[in-house]
Amino acid sequence: MKNAYFRIEIVPSKEERAEEWTDDQWRSVIDEYSQRMDISDAQAFWVLHKRTDHDELPHVHGRVMSFRLFMASCLKQPR
């Protein structure tokens, strides 16, 4: 594997009105997503994009960098 990370993008729908969300609400979404994907213990960073000069929905990019450690733990644990 050349890159030991994977990239995630979370884009709420227009109906969810993410442009009105607080930073705490975004943190909650990231925490819930991380728990559901079983990556909350992996080393990661997240970037929130809130562009107001374009017709673009607010969204979050994440990069999980301890991918090898994450995959090794998945292989050891029965699901």
Image: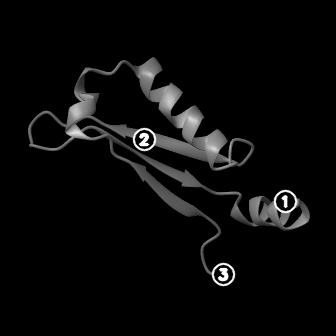
Q: Position of residue 17 (x, y in %)?
A: 23, 28
Q: Residue furthest bottom?
A: 1
**Residue highlighted by disc 1:** 73
Q: Position of residue 24 (x, y in %)?
A: 46, 18
**Residue highlighted by disc 2:** 47
Q: Position of residue 23 (x, y in %)?
A: 41, 21
The residue sitting at 9% across, 42% down in the picture is 54
The mark total stands at 3
The residue sitting at 60% across, 64% down in the picture is 5
Instruction: State the image quarter where residue 36 is shown.
Output: top right
Instruction: State the image quarter where residue 79 is shown.
Output: bottom right
CA–CA distance between discs 3 and 2?
Answer: 24 Å
Q: Which mark is residue 1?
A: 3
The residue sitting at 69% across, 62% down in the picture is 67
Mark 2 residue type:
Val
Viewport quadrant of the N terminus = bottom right
Disc 3 crowd rating (10 Å Cα; few below 14, some 14-19, many 20+) is few
